[in-house]
Amino acid sequence: MARPFKISSHVGGRPLPVKHSVTPTASNAVRSHFYFLQGKVDHVLEKYEGAFQNYEESLRHNLKNYQTLFCLSKVQFHMGNFQAAEQNLNAVLGCQKHKDSYEALRVLAQIKARQSKHPSNQMEALKLFRRVLELNPQDFDANFEIAALFEQIDPKQALIYYEAGVKVMRDSLKAERPFKFMQKWPSSFADP
């Protein structure tokens, strides 16, 4: 008899109770989703190696699971593997449904900003952050990140973005609403 796949993560040092498993006869879509969820648990717990392995396994069962591909790129970003993260984000953005994904564009802009020692990466980061701000002008972090990029090449432009970021923060505090960037799940990545 084939053994089922089981969730084996820990929270606070205690194992999570196993209530569900995926049988070996489960469809590839179900297996992909299962490994995605297991990866998400590890990701939230900052167990990046486990998250990486589970996201990879999820993609082995469904290469078109763009939610997994996006999350894998975030793990790769955290692990410092910018080249692989960039490649995966480009694959996500290459899908017609996700070509204007605010979340994927934002992470890609952050990668390019981290590699901004190269002038082409700096220009690409500026272009991507501008697109991110077109999609979500309320993203105060993006305003601050683009301002930091502009500090060296155009301080007046940097000031414009710093002021825009401060305005977003001030308006959010006045309205007593949480900042939009705090939403955990990207809305454009519905479950497969």
Image: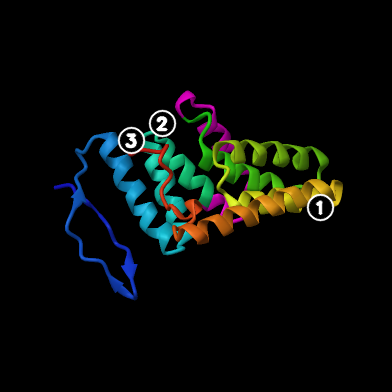
The span from disc 3 to disc 2 (Cα, nearest Å) is 8 Å
- Describe the element under mark 2 as helix, strand or loop: loop
* Residue 97 percent across, percent down from the top left: 45, 27
Dominant secondary structure, magenta: helix
Q: Is residue 136 above or below residue 52?
A: above
The span from disc 1 to disc 3 (Cα, nearest Å) is 41 Å
Q: Is residue 131 above or below residue 113?
A: above
Q: Quadrant of residue 112?
A: top right
Q: Is residue 85 visible?
A: no
* Residue 169 percent across, percent down from the top left: 57, 58
Q: Amino acid at mark 3?
A: Pro
For label 3, the crowd category at 10 Å Cα-Cα, with few meaning under 14, some 14 to 19 and many 20 or more, is few
Q: Read off the residue under disc 2.
A: 64
How many numbered callouts?
3
Q: Amino acid at mark 1?
A: Glu
* Residue 142 percent across, percent down from the top left: 63, 49
| Quadrant housing the C terminus | top left
Tell which circle, 1 or 3, labels the residue nearer the N-terminal end. 1
Are dots 3 and 2 in contact, CB under 8 Å? yes
Q: Amino acid at mark 2?
A: Lys
Q: Is residue 144 visible?
A: yes
Q: Read off the residue under disc 1.
A: 151
Highlighted magenta segment, given as a residue range: 75-97
Between residue 74 and residue 7, name the one nearer to us. Answer: 74
Could you tell me which residue is drawn at 20 percent across and 61 percent down?
A: 18
- Describe the element under mark 1 as helix, strand or loop: helix
For label 1, the crowd category at 10 Å Cα-Cα, with few meaning under 14, some 14 to 19 and many 20 or more, is few
* Left or right of 14, for residue 101: right
130 drawn magenta: no
